[in-house]
Image: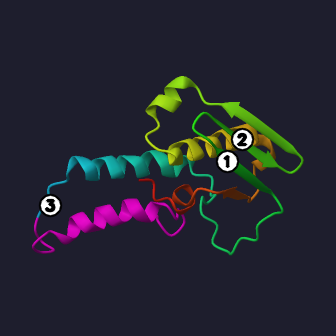
Amino acid sequence: MAACVKPGCIFMSRLLNSLQVSPSTRARLKVSVDMKANIAWWLDFLPIFNGTSLIKPQHWEFDDLQFTTDASLHAGGATCLNECFTCEFPEDIVRSAQHITALELYTIVVAVKFWATKLHQHKFIVSCDNEATVSGKLW
């Protein structure tokens, strides 16, 4: 199953790890709730799987599509090709953000939503001047 559904390796690994704790190959293994949930996922997913992989196996060449974002404590903005936008953050977003990194990430999410039709089925690069946001080390 996981050979044709690449993200399925995660689910299969969980099932196989559960089998490894069995003391012998002849022992009966109690099927946990988690294992049943994984099996149910496969039973639901495989009949509707269309063969499209979420992770492409070959090396990707990026299109010439790039957008750049930046944020302050109260607003954010982005540019893409010949377009740009700015937005003030809603007060509840500003209050709940514990760090500028969260606002930088919020700006990226808004930009992806804003240019969703342009980005659809394209590989693209996002540029951001916040190292924590870029590296994924959020706090």
Q: Locate residue 32 relative to residue 93 in the image: left or right.
A: left
Identify the residue under disc 2. 77
- Disc assigned to residue 29: 3
Q: Residue at x 43, y 40 (%)?
A: 98
**In the image, residue 109 lies in the stretch drawn in magenta:** no
Residue 101, image x, y percentages: 52, 48
Of residues 65 and 74, the one nearer the viewer is 74
Disc 1 or 3, which lies upstream in sequence? 3
The residues tagged by marks 1 and 2 sit, at their Cα atoms, a distance apart of: 6 Å
User: What type is the residue that disc 3 sits on?
Assistant: Leu
Disc 1 or 2, which lies upstream in sequence? 1
Residue extent of the magenta highlight: 1-27
> Given the current orientation, which residue lies at the most extreme front position?
73
**Number of callouts in the render?**
3
Residue 10, image x, y percentages: 40, 62
Disc 2 or 3, which lies upstream in sequence? 3
- Disc assigned to residue 6: none
Q: Are marks 2 and 3 in contact (CB under 8 Å)?
A: no
Identify the residue under disc 1. 70
